[in-house]
Image (cartoon, rainbow, N blue to C red):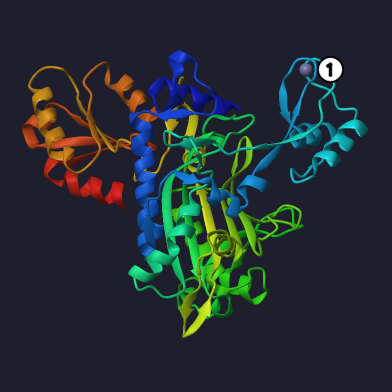
Amino acid sequence: MEKYDELIDLALRRGFFFPAAEIYNGPAGFWDYGPLGVTLKNKFIQLWREHLVKRDGMLEIDGAQILPQTVFAASGHLEHFVDPLIECSKCGTFYRADKLLSEKLGRDIPESLSCEEFDKLIGQAKLVCPRCKGKFKPTKKFNMMFSFSVGPRADEIVGLRPETCQSIFLDFPRLFRICRAKLPIALAQIGKAFRNEISPRQALLRQREFTQAEIEVFFNPERANEFEKFDQVADYELVMQLEGQSKPKKIKCADLVKKKIVSSKLIAYYLALLQQFYEKVGLCDFRFRQLGKDEKAFYAIDAFDFEVKTEIGWIELVACNYRGDHDLGGHQAGSKKNLTVLDEGKKVLPHIFELSMGVDRSIFCLLLQAIALEKVGKEERLVLRLPPRLAPISVAIYPLLNKDGLPEKAMEVYGQLKGWFDVIYDSSGSIGKRYRRADEIGIPFCVTIDHQTLKDNTVTIRDRDSMKQERIKIAELVNWLGKKVCG
Ligand SMILES: [Zn+2]
């Protein structure tokens, strides 16, 4: 847990993120991003837009966060979006029955069991409250949606969306029409989602309010293999851990289709796009894990979790599900509106392939992979090895000394770079201390203005990772940094 603890300490100390409503000791599972965290998050989102949305020509929407309960009745959330909840009859502590049973029995207990099945297992395992050894009341299903009413009469029940995708499904018919779209078409959305988790934990990993980036690809199932874009990725290898295997291995997209590991070229293509995106943001040690029958949702046809290895285990970042016509079929029945569209002159109810990304989790795991404690001579330095394009601050400008006209010259350089990069000016403390402060928030380049600068208009640039310095002309700074920061 060394890196995890370091990261939480750093996040609080430098304000990447911290608990919401801290001075009121607000409820668990809500986090605020500070300035450095926001910039990092914005850069991540910008890359998501460039390398997924724009690259593929997806249409992006920004839907309402509050939706009528009828939507969640049709989507199945009212019935199925539940966790098995047990309460100690003695001390009143709540637990998730599946988690507590899994720990006690040492095997995975699916959350989808009925209340009766849970009660039976709890009896057999002689499960008691870990806190006070009290007995449990009968299992209940706890719905994780936040529901309330709108309007002065309070007669319309609404819910905070537990995932962003529902508005994509609801908006699809209009967008298809007004954009004169053809199948297949991908719609994307980034925004907040809300889940009343029984036990939120691990900072940004399990929150009650979080940011999701979801992509829904609408397609005609009969033509999912007539997909020209697939040729771009046919030879590209995905890191795949198939059901029943203990290790991931690299498999070409063409082979995934040929061996029917995925059901179509369309799905292989979007999995490839996703992996290429995470390569671009600098994530390492990832895999697609193929889900088994007991793990995937009842409607899912192809189901993979995109996961990353960290010191606290494999963490799911993106759920990739071929959902068939479950979503549009449900909303067609619920709204009594015809949601079919024309494809090659035939009416079809499109099928959906979904990439559901946790943005905060992705950022947390990138930070977890980037943070390192290193020995430098006799000292230790904390360094955040974020890729330059993600680092919240790209360049720091330092005058070597606070005299001799160096601060003025440094401010001049700062002014030149400000319009191009995220840059800070720092003149307090020794240069060594300034480097350490820069290292721990991941500033990839530090520019120092010294006496030689005044003579020949050159500066030193120090590289965060190698700690090496080189001397370059001020006139070349923007170009040099542009190549390193923007790639
Ligand atoms: Zn108890």
Residue 376 visible: no
Q: Position of residue 185 (x, y in %)?
A: 44, 69
Q: How many marks?
A: 1
Above-or-below relation of 467 to 170: above
Which residue carries the number 1 mark? 133
**Horizontal and vertical percent for residue 153?**
45, 35
Q: Residue 450: percent from the left, percent from the top?
A: 16, 27
Is the residue at mark 1 in contact range of ligand 1, meaning its CB lies under 8 Å from it? Answer: yes
481 vs 51, left or right, is left
Q: Residue furthest right?
A: 124
**Amino acid type at mark 1:** Lys
Residue 230 seen anywhere in this rendered image of the structure = yes
Quarter of the image with the N terminus is: top right
Q: Secondary structure at mark 1?
A: loop
Instruction: From the viewer's perspective, tell me whether residue 139 is left or right of residue 401.
Output: right
Residue beneath the point at 63% across and 52% down: 76
How far from the left and from the top, in percent, is residue 379?
Answer: 45, 20
In this view, 389 is above or below 199 = below
Comparing 43 with 339, the one in front is 339
Front-lying residue, 252 or 296: 296
Q: Residue at x 36, y 35 (%)?
A: 38
Mark 1 nearby-residue class (10 Å; few <14, some 14–19, many ≥20): few
Query: Hey, which quadrant is residue 251 in on the image?
Result: bottom right
